[in-house]
Image (tube, rainbow, N blue to C red):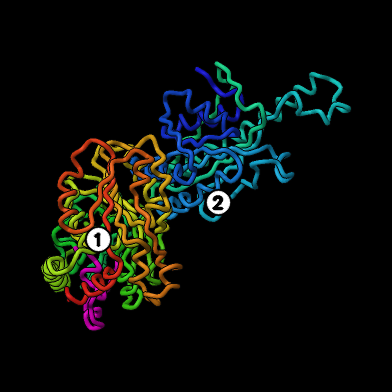
Amino acid sequence: MNYPKIPLAQTVIQLFKAKNIKHIVLSPGSRNAPLTIGFTHDSFFKCYSIVDERCAAFFALGIAQQIQQPVAVVCTSGSALLNYYPAVSEAFYSHIPLVVLSADRPKYLIGIGDGQTINQENVYKNHILYSANLKQDLNQDNAFAEDLPIIKSLENKLEKFLGLQQDIQQQNETEINITLNTAITNNGPVHINVPFDEPLYEMVDQLTVNPAVITIKKENITEDYDAFAKIWNSSKRKLVLVGVLSPNSVEQQFLNVLAEDESVFVMTETTSNLHHDKFCPSIDKLIGALTDHEFEKLQPDLLLTFGGLVVSKKIKKFLRTHKPKHHWHVAENGANDTFFVLSKVFKQTINGFFSQFLPLTQQVKSNYNPFWSGQMQIRREKHEDYMLSIPFSDFKAFDGILKSIPDGSQFQVGNSSAVRYAQLFDLSKTLEVFCNRGTSGIDGSTSTAIGAASVTNKQTVFVTGDLSFFYDSNALWNNYIPKNFRIIVINNEGGGIFRILPGHKNTANFDYFFETKHHLTAKQLCDMFGLEYVSAKDNNQLINVLSTFYKDKSPKLLEVFTSSAQNDTILLDYFKFIK
């Protein structure tokens, strides 16, 4: 087998292998050649080549999202690693283990105007769990040029060289171990900055270093639940709010216990992947048009949250205005005080918490769940009536699209309008739903979806808005798009969500600088990147296209054209209608 000659590159490769980090996303470059050589010549690793570093990082994030293990991105020096930053910040807030490996220039070449050189150390300092700035290996040929007048003996020179190199090797091994262990145990992004001097492309057929592997030590967390159980058992209005979760994160037996308690009302976001007939899966549908008096009836004594960040602005406003007496959150990685009343964080797994806490609880007689479950059913019926009454629009298109997605599919949804529309529908319980809600950016949704699709055999359907799609169009410059991957672009010729938000609409300033009106289509991109293209401009065309959209075995894109003139009115009138 061929290995990079540079010991530091060998050390990195071996420790990644020891930590079972298999998926490596590489972007072309020269300074990262020792790493590229090491990863691509070892059959243990699954290597991908993606030119655009921003797309590469989100592609890797999509893989990590699915396998829930660290995935590496490897780039050359200079601005390349800055293009990783959007995905790094998303991984930071979504608790996804992304490992950034950046090659760097030697220190003596930094700050002198050398090409492809920036200050790379700690570049992600505000959005990273750990940064390791490795030491460059000593080069025996030039390491002691400055010492020649002092060191007369070649033997002394060699002894000093070997001692210093051993210290550097041990320090690098420790730093790499700490970094990778942090990504594994804390589920978040880490950065390893690796300086290399030339020559970069030399190879050897035998390893010259054998790095030590530091094992992960797990802490046993114990908690005294008795006082919290007393609060739970004395509360007649308990609201459980669930944010982003991977599928099958919570055992169904615990969900059943919550569902059978009349004093507990469970609200789940589309991205929570939790289901029960007694849960409320469409939060905004229920609370979108409540009066102040009704909000007071919904106000909980106790709020229990788990999962990631919450999409619904309406539930945030409600809980910030009508604060619960207690807010508890369950998460291994801490919590955000989203509603400004957080009183307790249980730092453990959700299943671990419920297995210890629920046996201490008892069902409480209350009208809390029955009343709001009844209100939810009324809104479901009103929802169907409204769908029949509206013209073709974003809302109408989402109705048809979401009903068409085959059972058992992975549903990747873009940010901004797309995920908010999806929140208003009761999706099939068989779908696995994912969205980049860490920073809620539109910048890498397509790349993430393709990365996720590349490591699953499930039908993957990605639904996104036009601005998000065009923004990340280089995501299609990708040799790993599976045949069962489908993209649906809602093209309303601009950022439709800005028409829903407060602002001065229907002015030249608004159209140009906020909504960003355009007349682009995805057809030419599909021609360039080899995706099959279909389109729809009304409901009949949409239904007809969707009837065969998932059958062919080739990547395909459906572009749905809607008019932005009515979309905001149709959505805002919806909340009045279902009331």
Residue farthest along the bottom direction in this orientation: 293
Q: Residues within 10 Å of mark 2 (few under 14, many from 20)?
A: many
Decide whether residue 272 is among the magenta residues: no
Choose between 37 and 529: the one closer to the eye: 529
Compared across the picture, whether 164 is left or right of 215 comes to: right
In which quarter of the view is residue 68 placed?
Answer: top left
- Which of 24 and 562 lies nearest the eye of the viewer? 562
Which secondary structure, mark 1?
A: strand
Q: Where 187 sits versus 481, above or below?
A: below
Image quadrant holding the C terminus, namely bottom left
Reading the chain from its start, which is encountered first: label 2 or label 1? 2
407 and 475: which is toward the camera: 475
Seen at 40% across and 72% down, the residue is 340
Q: Residue at x 36, y 35 (%)?
A: 480
Determine if residue 257 is in view: no
User: Type of residue at label 2?
Assistant: Tyr
How far from the left and from the top, in percent, is residue 222? 36, 53
* Residue 268 tag number: 1
Residue 295 in magenta stretch = yes
Label 2, secondary structure: give it.
loop
Residue at x 41% of width, y 40% of height = 477
Q: Residues in magenta?
A: 280-303
Instruction: Give coordinates of residue 257: x percent, y percent.
Output: 17, 58
Residue wearing tag 2:
124
Q: CA distance from mark 2 to mark 1?
A: 33 Å
Circles 2 and 1: CB distance less than 8 Å?
no
Position of residue 289 measured from the top left corner of the image (x, y, whole percent): 23, 76
Inspect the image, locate mark 1, and give the three-letter code of the amino acid beneath it: Thr
Asked whether residue 220 appears in the rendered view, the answer is: yes
Residue 153 appears left or right of 272: right
Residue 357 or residue 294, whichever sits in front? 294
Residue 130, above or below 328: above
